[in-house]
Amino acid sequence: MTQKTSLPVIWPDNMRPGIAAKYLGVSDSKLAKLRMEPNRHLGPRFIKAAGCIVYRRSDLDDWLESHLVEAA
């Protein structure tokens, strides 16, 4: 019987939307909705260059931190 070894995930500093969604634990469509003009103030910052969307890991971490709920 072979044992499965789980390797640590190394997240890149810059991520396309599909990888960013996995990093955040949300669906691709949720992240896309947060990029829409009326919702941009709700989602993480992103870069749009030459029609490509890129998320910086530091911006994703900041967004997660801003949604932290302290235990009562």
Image (cartoon, rainbow, N blue to C red):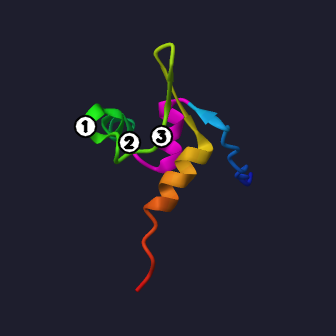
37 or 30, nearer to the observer: 37
Q: What residue sits 39% from the left and 45% below the top? A: 43
Q: Secondary structure at mark 3?
A: loop
The tag on residue 45 is 3
**Residue type for callout 3:** Arg
Q: What residue sits 48% from the left and 52% below the top? A: 63
Q: Position of residue 38 (x, y in %)?
A: 25, 37
Q: Alpha carbon of mark 3 to alpha carbon of mark 1: how far?
A: 14 Å
Q: Secondary structure at mark 1?
A: helix
Q: Position of residue 46 (x, y in %)?
A: 49, 34
Q: Callout 1: few (<14), some (14-19), or many (20+) C-alpha neighbours within 10 Å? A: few
Assign the N terminus to one quadrant of the image.
bottom right
Name of the residue lying farthest toward the left: 38
Q: Secondary structure at mark 2?
A: loop
User: Counting residues from the N terminus, which is met first, the one under dot 2 or under dot 3?
Assistant: 2
> Does the CB distance between marks 3 and 1 fall below 8 Å?
no
**Residue type for callout 1:** Pro
Name of the residue lying farthest toward the bottom: 72
Q: Which residue is mark 1?
A: 38
Vertical comparison of 22 with 67: above or below: above
Q: What residue sits 41% from the left and 47% below the top? A: 26
Q: Quadrant of residue 15?
A: top right
Q: Which residue is mark 2?
A: 27
User: Counting residues from the N terminus, which is met first, the one under dot 3 or under dot 1?
Assistant: 1
Q: What span is in magenta?
A: 16-27
Q: Alpha carbon of mark 2 to alpha carbon of mark 3: how far?
A: 17 Å
67 or 9, nearer to the observer: 67
Q: Callout 2: few (<14), some (14-19), or many (20+) C-alpha neighbours within 10 Å? A: some
- Position of 55 compared to 10: left or right? left
Assign the C terminus to one quadrant of the image.
bottom left
